[in-house]
Image: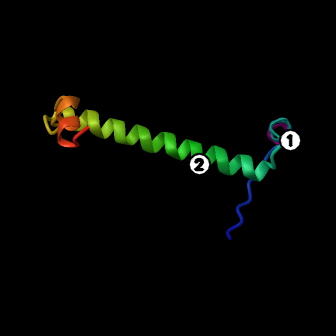
Amino acid sequence: MKTVSVRLNKEEERAFSAYADIMGQPLSTLFKKLMEERLEDEFDLKIAEDFVHREAKGEVETRPIEELFKELNL
């Protein structure tokens, strides 16, 4: 398991520690959770931007949802 150190000034330490206390979780757990959420958000944004770019270039093919339902026998 890798250990990562983060330097915090006094104000950051007070704010982050207060938040961790309110949430009832260790600071390290909150840092990991928030980092994971940020990565997921940025990944989702990248996928959406890619879709918009491909759609503008005419590379996206769509069809009515009813066709999919029929194909899947739903």
- Most prominent secondary structure in the magenta stretch? helix
Write down the residue under mark 1.
Answer: 10
Residue 55, visible in the rendered structure: yes
Residue appearing at x 83%, y 37% in the figure: 11
Residue appearing at x 52%, y 46% in the figure: 39
Q: Residues within 10 Å of mark 2 (few under 14, many from 20)?
A: few
Write down the residue under mark 2.
Answer: 36
- The spot of residue 60 in percent (x, y) is 17, 37
State the extent of the magenta-drawn residues as a range.
Answer: 10-17
Q: For numbered disc 1, what is the local secondary structure? A: helix
Q: Nearer the viewer, mark 2 or mark 1?
A: 2
Looking at the image, the residue that sits furthest to the left is 58
68 or 6: nearer the viewer: 68
- The spot of residue 71 in percent (x, y) is 17, 41
- The spot of residue 9 in percent (x, y) is 81, 44
Of callouts 2 and 1, the N-terminal one: 1
6 or 1: nearer the viewer: 1
Q: For numbered disc 2, what is the local secondary structure? A: helix
57 or 6: nearer the viewer: 57
Q: Is residue 12 magenta?
A: yes
Residue appearing at x 76%, y 53% in the figure: 28
Left or right placement of residue 37 versus residue 49 in this view: right
Instruction: Look at label 1 and name its amino acid.
Output: Lys
Q: CA distance from mark 2 to mark 1?
A: 25 Å
Instruction: Look at label 2 and name its amino acid.
Output: Glu
| Quadrant in the rendering for residue 37 | top right
